[in-house]
Structure formats: C-alpha cells, structure tokens
Image: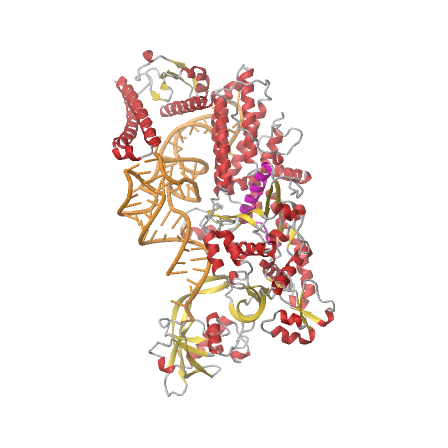
Amino acid sequence: MAELSKSYQPQEVECKWYQRWLEADAFRGDETSGREAYSIVIPPPNVTGILHLGHVLNNTIQDILARRARQQGKAVLWLPGTDHAGIATQSRVEAKLRKEGTSRRELGREKFLAEVWKWKEQHGGIIISQLQRLGCSCDWSRERFTMDPAYSRWISRIFVDLFNSGLIYRGKRMVNWCPVSLTALSDEEVIMKPQRGKLYYMRYKVAGTKNRWLEIATTRPETLMGDTAVAVHPKDERYKDLIGKFVWRPFPEAKIPIIAEDSLDPEFGTGVLKVTPAHDKADFAIGQRHNLPIIDIFHPDGTLNALAGPEFEGMDRFEARKAAAKKLEAMGQLVRVEDHENAVGYSERADVPIEPRISMQWFLRYPCVPEATNAVDQDEITFRPERWKKTYLHWMENIQDWCISRQLWWGHQIPVWYRKDKAASLREAENLDLSAVARGDLHCAIEPPSDPENWVRDEDVLDTWFSSWLWPFATMCDSDQKSSPTLKKFYPTSDLVTGPDILFFWVARMIMAGYYVEGQLPFRNVYYTSIIRDRFGRKLSKSLGNSPDPLDIIQALGADALRYSLLKTAPIGSDVRFHEERAGFKGGEGPKAIKQFDECVSGGGSYPQVEEGRNFATKIWNAANFRLMQGPPTRKKVRRSIVDIDILAKLDTMERQIDAAYADYRFSQIAELLHAFFWGDYCDWYIEAVKGDLRGADPARKSAVLQTMDTVFGRFLQHLHPFMPHLTEELWESLGFAGSGELLMLTPLPQEHATKGIKNLTESQAQAAALYQAVNRARNLKAEYNLAAKKVRFLLAPDPGHAWITGELATFALLSGASSCDLVSSDSEPDTENAPAALTPIGKLYMPLAGLIDVAAEKARLDKELEKIAKELAKSESKLTNENFVANAKPEVVQLERDRLNEWKDRHEQLLDMIRKLG
RNA sequence: GCACGGGUAGCUCAGUGGUAGAGCGGCUGGUUUACACCCAGUUGGUCGGGGGUUCGAAUCCCUCCUCGUGCACCA
C-alpha cells in the first residue's frame, strides 16, 4: 500500500473521479433492469442561469438520495435538464440587443429567436457543467430541455387536448400586466409589497348642483381620466341621496354616474370610491355589474395614451400621478394629501409594480383538481415538512384559472391559427371555442394547417410553467407514444426535491398534469428544502451581492466539503444561515453592521461552515494515511479486544441510526452521526487505544486491529459516500477496498451487521465504556495539576468485579498519558495526602505526587466534586421519596432513578472517605 | 386580517414527557512519529416572557412578546 500525499487536494481528486464515473457509465438509469426502481426528475434550472447555493443544496440532496438508492441495489434514474425560462432569458437577450443598438422588434421574430438560440448555445451549458463539478450523478444521456422539439410537441399536444376538452379558453380579462416585460403574468408571479404611498383626497362636483362636492380618496390619481363612475355604499347616510345622480370628472371633463356598491367599506377614506374599470381588478368587477364603459388610458409600457388627454399623453404613470395631483390642486379640487401605507403587486421578474390591465388572454381551468387535492390530503403524496400540505390544500381549494399566454417570443408558441381573412375579428373575439374550429375559422392542432398561406398563427407563447408541469413524464416518453420502457420503469418518480417557493408554480401543477395525462400521481414524496440566507438572515440576491459563488467555494475548499457542510447545517424545512466572513468586516449585528458588511468586498473571505466540511475531509484523509502506514493484516484468525468489539458495536449503532434518519430524510442528522462516529469514536478513541497494539510485538493482536480498522473504515466510507462522493471513492481505492477496480458508488451496502458472531458484545462494550470513562477521569486529574503534558504514574484500586482491567492497563496508560499504571489492593491504597485521587467506574485512581500535593487545594477540589455529587444525590433522593413519582412514573424510569441513586451514594461515600484520609 | 413556522451556550443549529447537546468561537496547556485543516483539558444556557396540565415540561395546552413565511387585503 502506497502512502497518500501529505494533505488532501480535493480539486484534482474530484475532477478525476467524476471522469471515472462518466467513463464507467455509472449514472445510467437502466430501464431494462429487474431491480427495484428509484427515480427523481431534477427541478430544471434556468438554461441561462448559473449555480447558486440554493441549487447546491437542492441538487446535493437529490444526489444523496440517488447515490444511497444505488448502494441499496436499486435501478436509479436521476433525470436532468433545463428549462427555457421565457421572460428571464428573453429579457437578457433583449438587454444585449439594446446594448448593440437594436431591438427584437427591429430584428423581427425569426431573427430574434435565432439570437436567443445563439445565446442559449453560449450560456446554456454552464449550469450543467457546474452541477457536474458538484458531483451530481445525473443520467446525462437523458438530459432534456423544454424547448427540444420532442418536448415541445408535448406542450402542443396538451394544449390541444385541453382546448378540445373545453378547459382552455380565451377571454378579455383583467390580468396582471408587467409594463417592463410587456406581458401578462399569472397571479403567482405577482408579489405583494408594502409601500409607503400617499392618499390623495380630491373633490368632484355633483352635476346639477350649485356648489355640492363629493370628496374622494385615492392612491392613484393618475387613473382618474379612466374613471367611469363613483361609488358609495347604499346604506351610507352621507351620500344616500346622491345615488343615481352624476358628478363631473375634472379631466377630461365628463359626467359620470354615482352608483351604489355593497362591496365597499364606508370607513375607508371618505367612503366614496372612484371607479376605474380598466385599471383595477375590483373596479372592473364593479364595472361589469353596473355595465360601465371601460376607458383604457395606458399604453402597454405604462405610459399614458391619448385618452388621458394631450397633456398626459406619453407620460410615465408615476410622473402622471404627480402631474394629475398638481392639476387637481391648480383647479382647487385637491383637498389634502395624507401618508398612506398599502400593498402593491410587483412583477416577480422585473420588480416593478404590475399594472392591472384588460387584455385578451388564454386561460386554463385546471384539470383533475379533485384527484390532485385528494392525493395530498390522503397522503398518497407526502410532503416534508408536512406543514406544506396545508398550504397546498388551501391553494387548491381557492384555485383560480391560470393565465397561460405570454406576450413574448421566446417560448412555445400557442398552437392556434386563425383564418387569414377573418384574423382581425377572430383575434378580438371573446369565448373562442370548438365551434370556431367547426366553422373552419380556427385551427388548433399539433401540426400547422396544410394550407399555411391561408392562416395566421397566434403570436403569444405559453407560460414557462405550462411546459414544466409536464416534466416528470414528458422527459420519459414521446408525446405520440402511449408509453415507453423508461416511463414504465421509472414513473411515477420516487422523490421530488424542490423549494417551497414553487409549490404553486410547479409542484401543484405537476400533480394535476400527472393525473390528467398519465392518470396517476407524478411522485410519491416531495421534500421541500430550506431557503439559504446570508449571515444576517437576508435572502441571497445578486443585487445585494450577498450570494457567494459556489464555484469559488468549491475551488477553495472542495465540492465534498461544500456538500457536507451545507447538508449538515440545513435543517429539515426551516431557513438556514450561511456564514460568510469578509476581509475588513468587524462583525456584529444590526443595520450598521450590515451596512459595513455590504461595503466589504465579497469573495476572498472565508466560510466557517464549509471549513468544517473541509476539516472533516482532511481528518478522514489523514486517518486513511495512518491506516496505510500500518501495512496489511497478516493473519486470518482474529481475537478481538474489548476496544475492537466496542468500535464495531458503535459502527452498528451508527448504521441503524443512519437508516432511521434516511427514512425521515433527516440529512443533517446523518451528517452529524457520521462526524461523531468517525472523529470521536473512531479517531479519538479507537485509534488512540490501539496504537500500542500496532507498535507491539504481538502479530495476532496487530492483525486483529488492522482487520477491525478495515471493516470500520470501509463501511464508514460507504455510508459517507452520498455526502462526500469523491473523497470516499478515492480512499476506497487507495485503501484497497476496490478489489479489481469496482467503484464504491456501485458497491452494495453490507447486509450483515459488523458485530455478527461476536459473543461477549454487551460485556465488552461495558468494559470499554468503563475504561474510557476512567481515562477521562485520569486526564482531568492531570489537567487539574497542570500535568496534562507530562507523563505521570497512576495507581488503580479496582472495585470488585473489575479484574478484567489487568489486561487493559497498558491501553489505559497510553490513553491517559501515563508512564505506567499499576494495580493496588484496597488495603494498600496510598493516602490521598500523597496522591490526589479520582473516582472511576473501575475503582479509585491515584496519582502519587511524592509530597508535592497542596493539601488545601486538593481538599477544595474534592469538596467541589462532593458538592456536585451531593446535588445529584439530593435530586435523585427527592424524586424517589416522592410517592407520586414512584406510583405514576414508568417502572423502568423508576428503576433507572434507583440505579442512579445507588451510584451517587456510592461515589459520595468514597469521596467522603478520600477527604477524611486527607486529614 | 387568516394560517403556518422559528425564538435553546457569544454564533450556527440538534434535541417532541424522564441526568440540557454538537460544531464554531473563547480560555489553558501541547511539535509523544496520522492529522496545528490537529490533540488534551476547560469555559459557557432560570431552553423568548407569563400562566396551566403532569410525579416530572426545552418538549403538551393557553396567553403575550418577537422575527419570518404563505394567503387575503381599504380604493
């Protein structure tokens, strides 16, 4: 066995093993396999996106699940891909064109799309290669992109199906309009943000009166030019008499009716509402009820149009707000302006206030809502954490039709063609449905019409989520096939790992699509990941510059370190803070500290959480190196010592706990178990305990130790592998566990317990525990006399029943840093005056100091310990003298308390004895 | 407004009825031949406040404070 390099260099090792896995085709999902299937579809990242920490967390979890499933002997498919991210990608390419002095309109649709594809070719592979650098074991041969021709056919097919079944319809509705992206958005893409705005009180003159005015409060005076009524509550005594009369809209001047509306709150403002049906959802509904005209005073980009009047035409909406208020003021009709807080909907992508706007859009009445609701309600699909179930059910119960058309070019163009000679009127027609197809006016099909010269295609594309919702099955089977071997083997998928932020966007819709298209659920478990925040709890964002580049971290500390650390600190379902240190940042909390932090340069700092993972990797590397230095075992026959047996038993326990933790998807616990076992049990205790045997002259003993080490190390590497795949694969090979080149990632987990066939298991464990505790006491004793670094001589007076310690004295001396440890019989125990003593589970331990001891200090030390014990003793006693406790507590709890009491009593007595001897 | 989640050591977090934990940090020692990305020892918490249930509460119930999330919102 060759020795390893002095320190672990992750970069080289990680890249090497990823290549080896690819060469071995180890990630392939075999649809012909007879083994149990395990499958995941990746939440497709944005094709032009780059990796952030959220991706790292999400994809590491998927990789862990996939790798563990392979180790369990399952046929695993982790199916990767990307989505085309309509708005995000299109706006990025448009920004690029703007820089080049042109625009998409100037280029035209065809040339523009060519530009987007060019962009995609340049940037589309980045995130995939980043996932590979992270170690993701996706079956890359099956990588899908939502704009692939085969995948696109699925979109058309589903659109046509839904249209033919009457679930897709078109209508002129109030939609969320993004004045920057120039498209409609679904309700889910609108984020409500609290705003510090103003409430403008203005007055309209009541028509036909000399001097009667109606005072109205509004946050949006710039829309008054589109007002077609004012409304009051029918029971409002102040205005009751005015219902049915008219007021004068100040500009453009017009007589508009005063109507009665139950829906409004007489307490708000003045109790009078200006009604602008074209620019407010609620006002639109009022307009419908009262047959009010609709006056749209906005251009699509949020500037005002000619209907607003010449002085406002072309003005931006926020400028117009000030201008309208100013004009009202000039007319003497602005009463006052108050500060006012309200919530305004923002476009998720463009981060500008959305504009409610009436436009012709395509809508979907969701299919299979009852099935999708039921599946989650009845736990056929389980959510983790479970609380998201409630959120899901609430959304499903209040589900609204989905606006699926987008006024973009990048995406799946709607498969609808209008007969050319009627196109103008058809485009404006409400309620287009199958009858239009029957009349021969409309063509809705996967394929274009056979006489394309007579048709024009609908220009809109579909919402990107309208393609992603088909992801679980559309990636596995062509749209013109009923099924495929892959679909048969791997659908429904096993687990879905995603963020709760896209529960409605994606998860809920996939469930409905799964039932609609495949007649069954698309996945069985949904694991919602944590949201990663910065050290102050802020969301990571590009504009804040608080989002570390994972590739920098990987470069500095290794992919395995990042994977392990993130998983270790990511609890199930709550947010996690990712700590970044920056050069020059002084620390602290609060606004001042945050500001100072933001002013420091990102990058070049450090990530303490990830350093923990890097340290762990190094520790394992060094332990492997130590193992290699010992050479191979020489004999077959083993006689295991108590510490050998003990470490195997601890391995056993860890394996059981890991199994249980996987069943609950408790990844941070698994990471912790692996750490505690390897660093604590194996390195700090076991290796240190057997160093004597390794240096010793007994080849049988040495061989037993080496075999034990190999068992433990090998199995540990297997369990660690899903978290740190590269390092474990490297050491698996270096330590000679790979046999004739078998990959660790494809090696099944052992079926049998490591302690199988060991007879004196419990006894050995108890003895090892006693030995280790005695060592702790010995080390304490040395430290208290400032002798931690010195070799001392110990004397041990074993209690009855601990004769076994005779064989372990060398180990005890080694671990406690003693030159020797000798046994004394209870009648020849030294005086505590000459030898400070401690109680151990084995017996009294003395550290003779040849008259060096400070009697007073020793007495104080023992008194302190006595006090501690007396406290515990009293606690135990009070419990046991409480009749209610003895009567009501579980018998085993009472027994435990009794044992504890006896132990305290024992130690108490012995301590008293020691103190007495001290004089 | 409704619903949900969090508040445990200086920091990040485990811990769902029975002796309060880990990592990082702090402090004291340490180049004994795997490892200073290390070792040994040590410090540190009326488990957000209050009330209740229970023999027993960080854990269950009520209430308040506080931070966060989702949904619905007054124009």
As drawn, A765 above or below A551: above
Q: What stretch is highlighted in magenta?
A: A45-72
Q: Nearer the viewer, residue A692 or A513?
A: A513
Q: Which colour scheme is used?
A: secondary structure
Q: In which quarter of the image is the C terminus of chain A?
A: top left
Task: Look at the magenta stretch and give its main secondary structure.
Answer: helix
Res. A434 image quadrant? bottom right
Q: Nearer the viewer, residue A512 or A122?
A: A512
Q: Position of residue A391 (x, y in %)?
A: 46, 55
Q: Quadrant of the N terminus of chain A?
A: top right
Q: Position of residue A377 (x, y in %)?
A: 48, 52
Query: Can residue A131 be seen from the camera position used here?
Result: yes
Q: Position of residue B59 (x, y in %)?
A: 36, 43
Judged left or right of residue A376, residue A516 is: right
Q: Where is residue A877 in the image (x, y as percent from the top left)?
A: 27, 29
Query: Can residue A558 be seen from the camera position used here?
Result: no
Res. A889 image quadrant? top left
Residue at coordinates 33% horizontally, 11% vertically from top-left? A828
As drawn, A428 above or below A912: below
Judged left or right of residue A553, residue A227 is: left
Residue A70 belongs to the span the image colors magenta: yes
Residue A569 belongs to the span the image colors magenta: no
